[in-house]
Amino acid sequence: MQNTVSLSQYVRKRNGVALGASHSMRNMLSRSFGAGSFPVFWHYWNPIWGYYLSRYIMKPLGLLLPSWQAVVFTFLVSGALHDLAVSFVKWKVVIFFTPWFFLMGIAVVLSKYFSISYRSYPWFVRAAINILFIGSTLLATCFVEGKYA
């Protein structure tokens, strides 16, 4: 039988505190925005969602595809699930998060490929760079979808 990490262990490793601890959200935001690269940002962002994506999407895909394709496909699945949730709430088909998450997945892969690191900068600079990554992929998605055309 395979030794697996529980959700509680995963969250503790990502946040530095136990699941449901009073500083869990603060730690997640501080660690993710202060990450020294965009792939590390995603390593810390939403550890509960990341646990399930890693366990049920990323790892199985990693057995079939090169790791960069597994990463992009995992972002696509996450985006599609976000779109599905919004579609249920709005009672109409929404396709916004899928292309946005696709672009963020590409940004993660390219950042890793080109070894883009800004970990030597102060926290607020790292946070600004991570926000810039998110914002630029969001703007690109909006332009592609014609929301700012």
Image (cartoon, grey):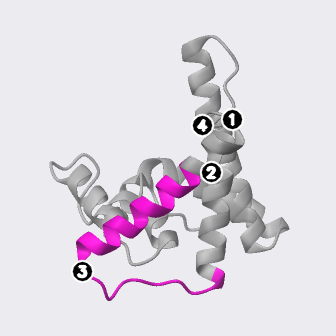
In this rendering, which labeled residue sits more in front, label 3 or label 2?
A: 2
**Horizontally, is 87 left or right of 69 in the view?**
left
**Horizontally, is 130 left or right of 104 in the view?**
left
Residue plotted at (66% across, 25% down): 94
**Residue beneath disc 2:** 140
**Quarter of the rendering containing residue 14:** bottom left
**Residue beneath disc 1:** 146
Give the amino acid type for the residue marked by disc 1 in the picture.
Answer: Gly
Task: Indicate whether 86 appears above or below 47.
Answer: above
| 3 or 4: tag closer to the N-terminus | 3
Residue plotted at (70% across, 37% down): 145
- The answer to whether residue 120 is magenta is yes
- What kind of element bears circle 4? loop
- Residue 44 or 51: which is nearer the viewer? 44
In this rendering, which labeled residue sits more in front, label 3 or label 1?
A: 1
- What kind of element bears circle 2? helix
Give the amino acid type for the residue marked by disc 4 in the picture.
Answer: Tyr
Q: Mark on residue 122? A: 3
The C terminus sits in image quarter:
top right
- Residue 80 or 60: which is nearer the viewer? 80
Residue plotted at (61% across, 41% down): 142
For the residues labelled 3 and 2, the Cα–Cα distance comes to 27 Å
Furthest toward the front, the residue is: 149
